[in-house]
Amino acid sequence: MENVIARLKKLKPDDFRILRAIEKGMEHYKHVPLSEIKSITKFDAEYINYLLDRLHKYELINRWTGNYIGYHLNQHGYDCLALNKLVKSDIIASFGKACGIGKEADVYEGLTPEDEVVAIKIHRLGRTSFRQTKRYRSYTADRRHLSWLYASRLAAEREYEALSILYPLKIAVPKPYGQNRHIVVMSNIVGDDLYTIKDLPHADKIFDIILKNVKKSYQKANIIHGDLSEFNIIITPKLKPLIIDWPQWVSTTHPNAFFYLKRDITNICVFFEKKFHILSDPLYLVNQIMSNK
């Protein structure tokens, strides 16, 4: 990302027009031909080639040579497009150190124009098996042709949508600040991953708080996390749980809603029983969450 930020600072408006043209062209082409870029930008061919060479040198696009010469965005070019839009929209003002590098996302610190510290989450679904990703993610199930970049964008859009619904209801999730393409900006996440904690004071109370938030999400927002476990719960310094990673959420009206809710609750119950010896009945808890009582 240091290289991406360095390149971002050197890019000019016409560079971004070319990047956006390639992005738009990728809706129809795996490798976007010069003629399509020219049609979108209205630049002359000589100037387009100059800009393409510049962007290729910066490693923001890839060049393909077959029966024609075509171009497509790589993840660095996509990063530049999203970050530039977030800066222009006054959502972020600066980009900081890495907070976490995962299988499906990278998280960095950032600052807003008001000097608030935020988390910049960059979805990168291409790190996992793409076939597996399509199989278990409901939001990609109906897309026949899906690029890595587009799949990451869908994940970011869904996560931001969930946070925008849940946070105003005072559910324990990060505050959403903004989203563009595959990047979500949210309140800074401070604390420890639940699965890493060996000694958790008042573990029974934290277990209850997690369940109350799951119930509130179900009852008030009609949202089920869909992938809840000890790996996406943060325990803050004040010993409060924060539920993160929402791109796989499903509605309570989903045909498999009961299955996803039961899986979420079972994961939490099994973890707290193994780690902190707290006994519970997952099916009973699921029924309690679904009940209006």
Image: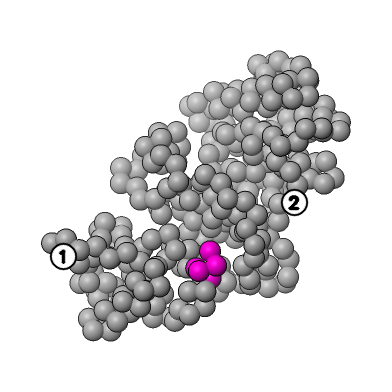
41, above or below 77, in the image: below
Residue displayed at 40% across by 73% down:
58
Q: Is residue 212 visible?
A: no
Please check the rendered image and state whether residue 2 is part of the magenta-colored stretch, yes or no.
Answer: yes
Q: Callout 2, which amino acid? A: Val
230, above or below 113, in the image: above
Q: What residue sits right under mark 1 in the picture?
A: 68
Q: Is residue 183 left or right of residue 26?
A: right
Q: What stretch of residues is rendered in magenta? A: 1-5
Q: Callout 1, which amino acid? A: Tyr
Disc nearer the start of the sequence (1/2): 1
Observer-nearest of 74 and 168: 74
Q: In this view, does 135 lie to the left or right of 226?
A: left
Please say if the residues under marks 1 and 2 sit with CB atoms less than 8 Å apart. Answer: no
Secondary-structure class at tag 1:
loop
Q: Position of residue 153 (x, y in %)?
A: 46, 53
Q: Position of residue 28 (x, y in %)?
A: 26, 57
Disc number for residue 198: none
Residue 197 position by quadrant: top right
Residue displayed at 54% across by 23% down:
259
Q: What residue sits right under mark 2 in the picture?
A: 190
